[in-house]
Amino acid sequence: MKISFKMFVFAGFLYSMTATADVWDSIEAYSLENQENEGVEDYVWKETGSQLPAYPQEDDLLEVSGPPAYRNYQYLIDSKSLTVGADRVVRYSIVIRSSSGSDNVMYDGLRCIVSQIKNYAYGTTGMDGKKKLIAREGTDWGAFRTTGATGYAPILASDYFCDHSGSVLKRHEIIQNIKYGKGPVDGLYY
């Protein structure tokens, strides 16, 4: 069977016209779908309030990976304080334990989609000898740090809290990731 060059070119032309029509149909469908979402570009994210959790208890701590340069520190997430808010913020207490056994405790919020972190509180021991969290006033959202002992945010985001597209996972998916490693499809568990 011989195919002439003209027939080959004509078939290619028909294919390209069909593909072009499909693209235009997709653009038209997208435009029609978003006509109902007027003002969508005016959306402004708002942070919801949160109360400070109780000071972390040893039985509730789950180990996570920390920055590679700080292998002599242990990084522990308090499972009781771990929440995913309606504002898509993962809030959690983290304990950074040195090899000598001293703890630094912080209560943070992490936003997956914009790679930002905020410190809401830090742990201290009161005059009465009880450990508690003290709220920080006037803290703002900032970019993930990648250096120092507190450079854990990018690791928490990529290995535990967020999926490959930058969306926050559900609380039970995060707990699964911490306990068993990231799921086969970025935290999708049944």
Image (cartoon, rainbow, N blue to C red):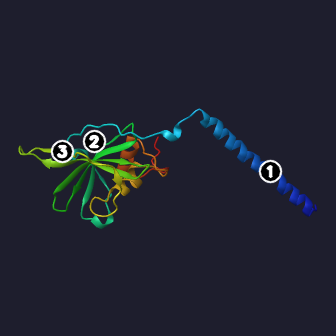
Q: Is residue 180 visible in this depiction of the protein?
A: no
In the image, what residue occupies the spot 38% across and 51% down? 160
Q: Position of residue 34 (x, y in %)?
A: 60, 37
In the image, what residue occupies the spot 52% across and 38% down? 40
| Residue at mark 1 to residue at mark 2: CA–CA distance | 56 Å
Depth-wise, is mark 2 or mark 3 nearer the camera? 3
| Amino acid at the residue labelled 1 | Met
Q: Residue furthest bottom?
A: 69
| Residue at mark 3 to residue at mark 1: CA–CA distance | 65 Å
Residue 18, placed above or below residue 42: below
Binning the other alpha carbons within 10 Å of mark 3 as few (below 14), some (14 to 19) or many (20 upward) gives some
| Amino acid at the residue labelled 3 | Ile
Q: Quadrant of residue 66?
A: bottom left
Q: Mark on residue 17?
A: 1
Depth-wise, is mark 1 or mark 2 nearer the camera? 1
Q: Position of residue 62 (x, y in %)?
A: 29, 49
Judged from the image, the secondary structure of the residue bearing numbered disc 2 is loop
According to the picture, the residue beneath numbered tag 2 turns out to be 81
According to the picture, the residue beneath numbered tag 3 turns out to be 134
Q: Sequence order check: which comes first, mark 3 or mark 1?
A: 1
- From the viewer's perspective, tell me whether residue 131 is left or right of residue 153: left
Q: Sequence order check: which comes first, mark 2 or mark 3?
A: 2
Q: Which one is in front, 160 or 150?
A: 150
Q: Quadrant of residue 96?
A: bottom left
How many numbered discs, if any? Answer: 3
| Amino acid at the residue labelled 2 | Ser
Q: Quadrant of residue 30?
A: top right
Binning the other alpha carbons within 10 Å of mark 2 as few (below 14), some (14 to 19) or many (20 upward) gives many
- From the viewer's perspective, tell me whether residue 148 is left or right of residue 8: left
In the image, what residue occupies the spot 33% across and 59% down? 145
Q: Residue furthest top?
A: 36
